[in-house]
Amino acid sequence: MGLKMSVTREAHQINSTENSLQETLAQLVAFDSVSSRSNTEIINYLAERTEGYGLIVKRFSYADENGVEKENLIAIAGADSSDSVEVELALVGHTDTVPYDLAWNDALRLSERDGKLFGRGACDTKAFIAASLAAMVAVDLKDLRRPLALIFTADEEIGCIGAKHLADARAIRPRYSIVGEPTCLQPIRAGKGYCLAEITVRGREGHSAYPQLGASAIFRAARLVNRIERSADELKRDERAGFDPPYTTLNVGIIKGGKAKNIIAGECTFTLEWRPVPGQNSKRVLDMVNAAIEEERKSDDDFDAEVRQARLQAAMETPEDSPLVTFLEEETGRAAGTIAFATEAPQMAELGAQSVVFGPGDIRVAHRTGEFVSKEELQSASRILTRAVEHFCM
């Protein structure tokens, strides 16, 4: 009888924890924290929750390029609130989401179906944030022997801007960090960088019936793009095992130019994206572009092009034998892998952390209408993060 009551009580506690975790995720999803809006409301909520757990909260505000107020939050346990505090482990989640289709009526209301929890941000990355908060409840923070931090950022989806502000401020020095992203609970120890440049090519406008009187910026841009594409073959020789594909990739995703069908185009602009592999200088592609421009000038003295660097985020790589990598591999039973999409791990590395990207959910369903996270992965993430806190900080 006693054993039966004990088992029943334990089952009740598990169900209670699961319900609380799902309720927290529902509250997080209810905040409309699309990157174009202020994230102050969700930060207020997170500040209240973490202060209620006894963590010391520090807020860092800034205005984005449109003058919208944004905030990062650092909540610390086991240390005072002095500047540039050292912590053993940081759990890092971004509060912003991508936009959602207004026809998705339940985008901001968590719904459940077939063991899946649907809502904007449910997968990317509010499930990780909910699991991080649950870990704070599951451990006795008074027993911490080494400091712990929760870091919640703004504007990850539009360039990791909030994390870059934190890196510039040097407000915290984590030894290890788990950066929340939907990885299907696979630890990710390396990721490609993410870089953008906008290239403007100029020509001379004129009547299209007399092409000899002008110079088409579109034709010039096409030749430059072709030369960049050919020189990209050089990048394929610099391979890194474990990535798919194993080299730096290039993409021209946007090209715009010209005013009318019968006017020689005076200007053409295209956006070049590249994702550098670890160990490669992120500016290598920029050097290649400038070299291609110089080659064009050899055959066209009047060739005019301007390169504007828009984003330059380096790749990240944490050693295979890092204690954090080893721990998460053992906890998940999965070997650490790599990713080709951008995360906040490079900014955590700037702050001194060995970082692993990890979290519930699948990146292939993130950002789409009907984004979801499975209940099972959400619960597993909570347990793994709890054990991470116990292992590194207690």
Image: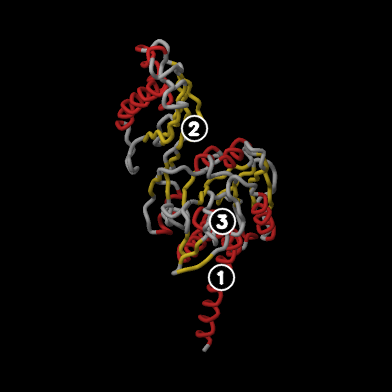
Give the camera-side residue of 83 and 186. 186
Which amino acid lies under the numbered mark 2 shown in the image of this protein? Leu
Task: Pinpoint residue 10: horizontal percent, then vertical percent.
Answer: 53, 77
Name the residue tied to disc 3.
129
- Kindly identify the amino acid type of the residue bearing the numbered disc 1: Asn
Specify which label sits upstream in the sequence, 3 or 2.
3
Image side of residue 211 versus residue 370, left or right: left
Instruction: Name the mark on residue 19.
Output: 1
What number is the disc on residue 360? none
* Left or right of residue 278: residue 237: left
* C-beta proximity under 8 Å, tags 3 and 2: no
Q: Circle 2 — which element? A: strand
Do the CB atoms of the residues marked 1 and 3 lie less than 8 Å apart?
A: no
Q: Residues within 10 Å of mark 2 (few under 14, many from 20)?
A: some
Helix, strand or loop at label 1? It is helix
Q: Which residue is mark 2?
A: 312
Mark 1 or mark 3, which has the lower sequence index?
Answer: 1
